[in-house]
Amino acid sequence: MSLIRVAAGLLLGAFVGAAAAQSRDLPDFTSLVEEQGPAVVNISTTQVPHRSVAPQLPNIEDEEMLEFFRRFIPRQPSPGPRQESRSLGSGFIISADGYILTNAHVIDAADEIDVRLTDKREFKAKVVGADKRSDVALIKIDASHLPVVRVGDPGRLKVGEWVVAIGSPFGFENTVTAGIVSAKGRSLPQENFVPFIQTDVAINPGNSGGPLFNMRGEVVGVNSQIYSRTGGFMGLSFAIPIDVALDVQQQLRDKGRVSRGRIGVVIQEVTRDLAQSFGLDRARGALVNSVEKGSPAEKSGIEATDIITRFDGKDVESSSDLPRIVGATRPGSKVQLEVWRKGASRALTLTVGELQEERVASTDAPRERSKPGALAANRLGVVVAELSAEQKRDLGLEQGLVVTDVRPDARADLRRGDVLLKLVHNGRHTELKSTEQLNRLLAGLERDAVITLQVRRGESIAFVTVSGLGDKG
């Protein structure tokens, strides 16, 4: 019996010891919240819709005259009570004299901005500046000796590291949630200038603009958006790195706007097939589809079909890296870049321009005006014809082959009206001048060959990769 008691005691002691060791390994966020929580604020905004009512119309029987009055007499502001719409968000204090960082979408179109501190003090805030491209805004309250967050280095973050968010989800002030870094440098659709930090921290409406802390109590990001099919948290949250946000706020404070670099190229991702056809060692860089005339890129000697692999000392691993690196470069800076061109690396020097506005290329296909007696489908499964003099003049091209028909079994993702400009195979670039030349090139390729076609589609340039041409005709 005594041996059983001893054994039971040993087992119980081992279990308690293991539980204590496990509890010591779990993170404790209490000190972090106590120290940094007071610098996190609740932001509420008010938007007052300006309603209008129709004026009293004269007693007119003629319907046409009455319609004239309805359409052209201006409507007057409503004398009735105004209805206000409110939204909630978060922010954090970055200077003791009242500068606060938040998201641009939190304060967008607001008529009034109210800031509430953890000690229940409330202030009216004014907007210093907002940048919709990065979703960063800087606001200011009239106060002093305020608690301030500590700023960390997001570059030191590691995937799997614990992080903490403090904010006001659904209006519940000073809510603390925790999780880990899921990924770094994440690109999101329509967000070309921010390398987002992805986390699984619970973020919900009202958390926007709040800080993301590391375990040292340092702000490493600004919680910005979530991926959700329900409107609520689903395990995918994204934060703007704090270094990006601070650079934006400094420009907003100094100039009231943000300057970004641009070089004037249209790019696409380099896939494994593209890398193989261009003779590149692996899929990396940004493939230049087209170069804007008169742009910094054209002046530096960048050409369509170049693959930009390095810019200003930074590697370009994917096409999404290039807009961020260029955008973060000050306009007027002279930088070095490397491009992969026709099987060899070349160094170029470029003076960065300034991004002024969005430029969206048209995807409308040119009008089809094929020559009579078009040729039969080639090994790509498309029918092509040489450009007429009129087509060359309208498109501003000296040569090329227009796609006049695409067969159901086509091996290339081409459309009627596309103009084929070049064929790339094993790093060799061949300009396409005649249907006979194209068919001869295709006939000389093996059935498993990987080629890339440079295609003019509307006003844009794209690269289409074809993997496998099938048997020779």
Image (tube, rainbow, N blue to C red):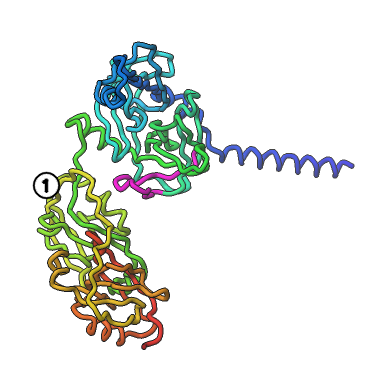
Dot 1: within a 10 Å radius of its alpha carbon, few (fewer than 14), some, or many (20 or more) residues? few
Q: Quadrant of the C terminus?
A: bottom left
How many marks the image carries: the answer is: 1
Residue shown at 12% from the left, 67% from the top: 393
Q: Is residue 343 visible?
A: no
| Residue 197 forms part of the magenta stretch | yes
* Residue 234 spot, x, y in % from top left: 52, 42
Q: Is residue 413 left or right of residue 427?
A: right
* Residue 251 spot, x, y in % from top left: 21, 34
Q: Is residue 290 visible?
A: yes
404 or 471: nearer the viewer: 404
151 or 211: nearer the viewer: 211
Residue shown at 26% from the left, 63% from the top: 457
* Residue 418 spot, x, y in % from top left: 27, 68
The part of the chain drawn in magenta is 184-201
Q: Which residue is mark 1?
A: 332
Callout 1: SS: loop
Q: Is residue 295 above or below residue 196?
A: below
* Residue 382 spot, x, y in % from top left: 33, 76
Quadrant assignment, res 151 = top left
Q: Is residue 183 above or below residue 428?
A: above
| Residue 183 forms part of the magenta stretch | no
Report the magenta stretch's main SS. Answer: strand
